[in-house]
Image (cartoon, coloured by chain):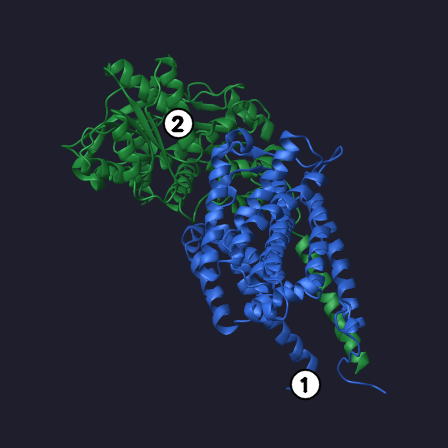
Amino acid sequence: MKRKSIIWQLMVYVVAVSLVAITSAWAGERDGITSKNVKIGILTALTGPAALYGKECASAVQLYFKMINDKGGLNGRKVDTIPVDGAWNPATAVGAMKILIYKDKVFVANTFGSQATTSTYNMIRKNNLPVQVIGPVSTLYNPPRKQVFCVETSYKTETIIGVKYVMETMEAKDPKFGIIYIDDVGGRGSLEGLRAALNIYGLKAVSEQSYSRGTTDFSSQVINLQRAGANYVILWALTGEVVQILKQANALNYKPQFIGLSPCTTNKLIQLAGDSVKGFFTVSHTALVDEDVPGMKLIRKVAQKYDMKPGVTPYYYHSWAMAKVWDTAIRMAEKKGDLTRTGVIKAMERIRDLDTGGILPPINFSPTQHQAGTMARVTKVDMKTKRFVPVSGWIEASF
Amino acid sequence: MATCGQFKTTYREDIKVWKTLWLKSWFAFLFMLMILFPILNPADCYLLYITNICGIAVIGSIGLNMLSGVTGQISIGHAAFLAIGAYTSAILTATLKFPFPIALIISGFVAALLGLVVGLPSMRIKGLYLLLSTMAFYFITLYVLVHWKSLTGGVEGIEVQTKIGSFELDTDLKFYFLIMPIVVLLTAFARNFLHTKPGRACIAIRDRDIAAETIGVNLFKYKTIAFGISSFYAGIAGSLFGHYIGWITPEHFPFSLSIEYLAMIIVGGLGSVLGSIFGAIFIIAVPEGIRLISHFLSNIYPDVIMKFIDLKGVIFGLIIISFLVFEPEGLAGRWEKIKIYFKNWPYAY
């Protein structure tokens, strides 16, 4: 009996040690580029509250490189796009990035969301992994971090442009600015932009109202703005939230000039908000979904070719532009004979006036500037056609 | 004369941690495995990362189990204590330049101190009302973290580095050898605590507080002790998490994290240290496993990840519901049944 027990225990030992040995065979490393293929990772949110946006980010990059692969690949290399789910959760994002770096050994990667990037930044730095981020948080680019790039215009800059438009183009008389912003990195960026811009004109916001994610009732914020007499109100909010704010303001007969930013520049907003969206305008750094600029036409054409639907959010088009940036940077690095991660980073820093066919303003990076976006446009709701129409060209944030 | 079963003739024998030679040899094997496992892996890899995150979750879930499983005080503010630990440690190391080991210990005590404060109303309020007060504490903590920008960095958070002297902990392997000894130490403490006077008092409070008070248990004292110990564990877990991730923001501590910790102790087994370990590993490893499966499948069928990923939540939910329905005692309960089965095998009893 005792002997049987010892044999049994030994067997368990052997199985357990073998399991450890098998799992350790997972080891491996780096680079992600061969003469035949190049791997591009996409750390995005395929599940969770931001899944709609996250999936579009992955789809756009996949569509772009499908087109490139059909044209013979990136200098003859097939591009493999590898999406992983960060679920809009910092801890999950770290695990996802580990998969991309240590298992799939991607060459470069996109990340979706500033918290996904901050959580994985140590890994990005240590592995010298070039990344492009959807999430224009100033701390990530100011001062510039070697591996981190962003094609977007920050919410801070968009807000500054919004104030500049009101003050200089609309020539507002007795403007009293207010803001409703979500209490996160994006919203706070917008608040900073408002304060900075108003400071230049010697003004101060009459009311600053924040809200938490998941809020559906904005009546207290709207009433506070009304009491403070704000006649220009910046909104850093997503489409559904803007709809609620506009409807609640309308119900209270409060009719200031509301100014949204790029996250709510979707035609869905016009459909949902009804008459309360009348006169609404936004500041956005992305071309409108139904705009006939060459870049948007190309996306529609390629999507149709592969029987896919183009995205409905700005993030889809940002991601397409990001794919174009990788395409350009990798080709530039190869031309310089330095097809390494460092080579790609250097190539990124040499990108000047990259034309995305009007999807974004021309993209410029340099060793001191890793956030390309410095411009945005103003768009206004056209109640006849129920869509946004641009009312300005690209405006610089500088004064 | 050969005997069957274990016979104890003193209380000291009954509360021994290492009861049998068999148990000792298993623990020796476990320690050997814990040392071999990281050495056989590269210094940075996904598997070590998951192991480290499981280790941190084990510390946090043991803490919550001491409060909710052992003492019967339900809390959904655990994420707040994790955040307090993480921020205390980050502020001490990044701003005040404290050495990491000191910051780690202080973060545990700061969380424990606040835990004692949160525990004060537990004398007057119970059940769902206590649950609501811990929830309120979570939201107050989050508000402070977001708005006290000069101290916490606001929504942009704090970037932290982990150094012990000039030695930087910058790989999964180094963190493994930091986290695992702490896991072992805190697990051993929790296991022993249950056999001490305060431990038994906490169990008595959970089983029937009026009866416990009748036999002389000071409810106020032991409930606040439970809150303190639970928060201490959470503070340590939070500190380790913050340093491991390297950058903390309030978004790292969502309300759902508290729910996740509750799920860990329910799935693992309420009131059981082993259950906390099983539960933490289960809640962390199963979603990762599902993600890995979908990832592997995507190599064969490129579009599968986009379709399969939506099922992730459904599969995870089904597994948890199945456990609650078929094994209400949690994974620890199932483990006990398996042990008894093999002990009696080939007999049914």
Mark linked to residue B148:
none
Judge whether B282 appears above or below A250 on screen.
below
Q: What whole-number distance in Å separates the C-alpha atoms at marks 1 and 2?
A: 71 Å
x, y percentage for residue B185?
Answer: 73, 54
Q: Is residue B153 visible?
A: yes
Secondary structure type for disc 1:
loop
Between circles 1 and 2, the one closer to the viewer is 2
Work out which quarter of the rendered image holds the N terminus of chain A and state it.
bottom right
Residue marked by disc 1 = B346
What hue represents chain B?
A: blue
Q: Residue at x 48, y 57 (%)?
A: B130
Mark linked to residue A191:
2
Q: In the image, what residue type sits under mark 2?
A: Leu
x, y percentage for residue B7?
Answer: 77, 80
Query: Which lettered chain is shown in green?
Result: A
Secondary structure type for disc 2:
helix
Q: Residue at x 44, y 23 (%)?
A: A372
Work out which quarter of the rendered image holds the C terminus of chain A and state it.
top left
Q: In the image, what residue type sits under mark 1?
A: Pro
Specify whether B162 is left or right of B166: left
